[in-house]
Image (cartoon, helix red, strand yellow):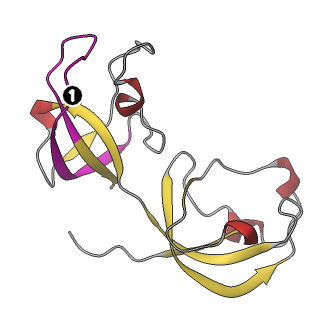
Amino acid sequence: MSDVKPKVTLIGTTLARVDLEFIYEGESTECEGCTVMKACHNLKPGRRYRIVGVRKTRHACPLHLEGATAVEVVESSVPALISADMAIRNTRISFEPSCTRESCEHFPLCHPEGLVPGEKYVVVQVLGNAPPGCAKGRNLQRVELRAV
């Protein structure tokens, strides 16, 4: 797969460090009227990002006490469990969790934070069989997914 070009956004200065991963949650009411709001909110809500570079540019921010710093981010791959028949490296899939059993030990990997149901992802890597114990008895594979 080709290298992904980083996107520049703003994040709280105390959080601005290389390799920090975060899930962009969307706009806050404190952001209304901010002059740099578009630079902060140029990511997709619900997606997981990793900081790959920190720039020197800083801005005052009504939300972050020490202001906001410009950072370069890329979308992170997210570990997940998917049906074994879809677990083929470099394949595009539509992520649809099919289990709603929150008590299942696999639930966090079947519903990982950072993946948005119904959106398209690429299977970046197949990591192997899921540990036994699926409450529905499904044949699952552990994979790394990245947004298309």
Label 1: few (<14), some (14–19) or many (≥20) C-alpha neighbours in 10 Å: few
Q: Residue furthest bottom?
A: 56
- In this view of the protein, which residue sits in the foreground, 82 or 109? 109
> Along the horizontal axis of the image, is 6 left or right of 31?
left
At which x and y percent is residue 136? 25, 10
Q: Residue at x 38, y 35 (%)?
A: 118
> Along the horizontal axis of the image, is 4 left or right of 49?
left
At which x and y percent is residue 65? 88, 65
Q: Verify whether residue 137 appears in magenta.
A: yes
Question: What is the quadrant of the N terminus in the image?
Answer: bottom left
Instruction: Tell me how many marks there are.
Output: 1
Q: Which residues are the magenta region?
A: 119-142
At which x and y percent is residue 41? 67, 61
Residue 46 lies, with reference to residue 141, above or below; the image says below
| Residue 138 in which image quadrant | top left
Name the element at disc 1.
loop
> Along the horizontal axis of the image, is 134 left or right of 49?
left
Residue 132 lies, with reference to residue 118, above or below; the image says above
Residue 113 lies, with reference to residue 73, above or below; the image says above
Residue 78 lies, with reference to residue 8, above or below; the image says above
Name the amino acid type tagged 1.
Pro
Q: Residue at x 41, y 14 (%)?
A: 100
> Along the horizontal axis of the image, is 4 left or right of 141?
right
Q: Residue at x 15, y 36 (%)?
A: 86
Question: What is the quadrant of the C terminus in the image?
Answer: bottom left
At which x and y percent is residue 102? 45, 15
Q: Which residue is mark 1?
A: 131
Q: Residue at x 64, y 47 (%)?
A: 25
